[in-house]
Amino acid sequence: MKMPTRTSLGLTAVAALLFALPGPAHAAAPAPVYAPSTAIADPGVLRENGDFYVYSTGSGVRVSRGDEAVGPWSNTGPALDLDPMPGWMANGDVWAPDVWRTGAGFVMYFSAVAKDFGGQRCIGVAVNTTADPSGKFQPAAQPLVCPGGRHGGGDRVPGRPIADAGVIDPSPFIDSDGRRFLLYKTQQTPSTLRMVRLTDSGVQWFGNDSGELLRRDGIIENPVLVQRGNQFVLFASRYGYDNCSYATVWLRSTDRWHFGGATEHSLLTTAGTGICGPGGSDVTTSLDGGWRIFLHGWVCGTGTRACTPSQIDNGADRRRSLYAAILNWGADNATPVVGAFL
């Protein structure tokens, strides 16, 4: 479960004056809160013992720790123990990890290329029983989600749009009754967002195979689900991740399993934020009673300046960096509104 966030009220007040959203048609980009020379992509955020831990795409899962949302941040190294590597994994490259705490310890979900699956991915699960969220996670021998039940995967992803499509972007969710679920995306287009119920430990599926929440002819990915009273708010990323068109959207429904008829709203775009490709978002509560949203965006060169579309088109050196902002909920308590960037 996402844990509370700590932030400085002084910094929040200053940031609110500097970077309020929605902004002008082409807003000036805020600075990232963390922009190391290696990428921070697809952040999954956990707050534990007063610190932030961000798990991101990379070999063995990169973990970054921050004292506050604004930092300072540091790289604590790879978290996934791949010696030996589970037999289903083709290599140690891992995408879009996310972590929460359950009765089993810290539980990580990640996607990786599966053997004998045409380069497509399955979703694995790993557990860290130490008191350190950046400690080594031990992966299970079999994947948790693998289309068709390949490699002994639990959830078989029935009815996916494309028979040879893999799965990626796992995201945990716990409802107001304490029931645990896992959301993810099917690869290729049309793409879908799906959800499967988990056991209380979060390490196995529970009951039936996953259900389809939403389908798009184009790309929709990186699902994150939040319950607000009897409303369920689904965040997702749209369009291609590798350019400035990448964006964050949201939908709302009273039925957690069905968003197909819900209206899709833009939340974060390049025009509104100045950030190149603001996506891969994750949300969390904060210590002051509010919420925060973390995301990645492209920066070009060795500094922290956001890429322009022309730089992306011309192949400029670039990497994804971490941004953070205040997340508000509107007068109805169920409409997400991005406020100030930190």
Image (spheres, rainbow, N blue to C red):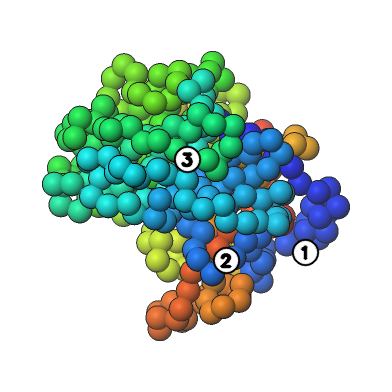
Marks 1 and 3, how far apart in space?
39 Å
The amino acid type found where label 3 is placed reads: Lys
Marks 3 and 2, how far apart in space?
22 Å
Q: Residue furthest bottom?
A: 314
The residue beneath circle 1 is 18
The amino acid type found where label 2 is placed reads: Pro
Instruction: Give the quarter of the image for residue 46.
Output: top right
* Disc 2 residue crowd, few under 14, some 14–19, many 20+, Cα 10 Å: some
Instruction: Identify the residue at horizontal 33%, vertical 37% (top origin).
Output: 124
Which secondary structure lies at badge 2? loop
Along the polypeptide, which appears first: circle 1 or circle 3? Answer: 1
Which secondary structure lies at badge 1? helix
Q: Nearer the viewer, mark 1 or mark 2?
A: 2
Residue in front for this viewpoint, 145 or 85 = 85
State the mark number for residue 136. 3
**Picture coordinates of residue 283, whole percent (x, y):** 58, 42
- On-image quarter of the C terminus: bottom right
* Disc 1 residue crowd, few under 14, some 14–19, many 20+, Cα 10 Å: some
- Is residue 313 rendered to the left or right of residue 342? left
Instruction: Identify the residue at horizontal 83%, vertical 48% (top origin).
Output: 9
Residue in front for this viewpoint, 18 or 166 = 166
Along the polypeptide, which appears first: circle 1 or circle 2? Answer: 1
Looking at the image, can residue 334 be seen? no
Which secondary structure lies at badge 3? loop
The residue beneath circle 2 is 36
**Picture coordinates of residue 325, whole percent (x, y):** 67, 52
The amino acid type found where label 1 is placed reads: Leu
**Picture coordinates of residue 300, whole percent (x, y):** 52, 76
Above or below, comparing residue 310 to residue 322 in the picture: below
Residue in front for this viewpoint, 118 or 82 = 82
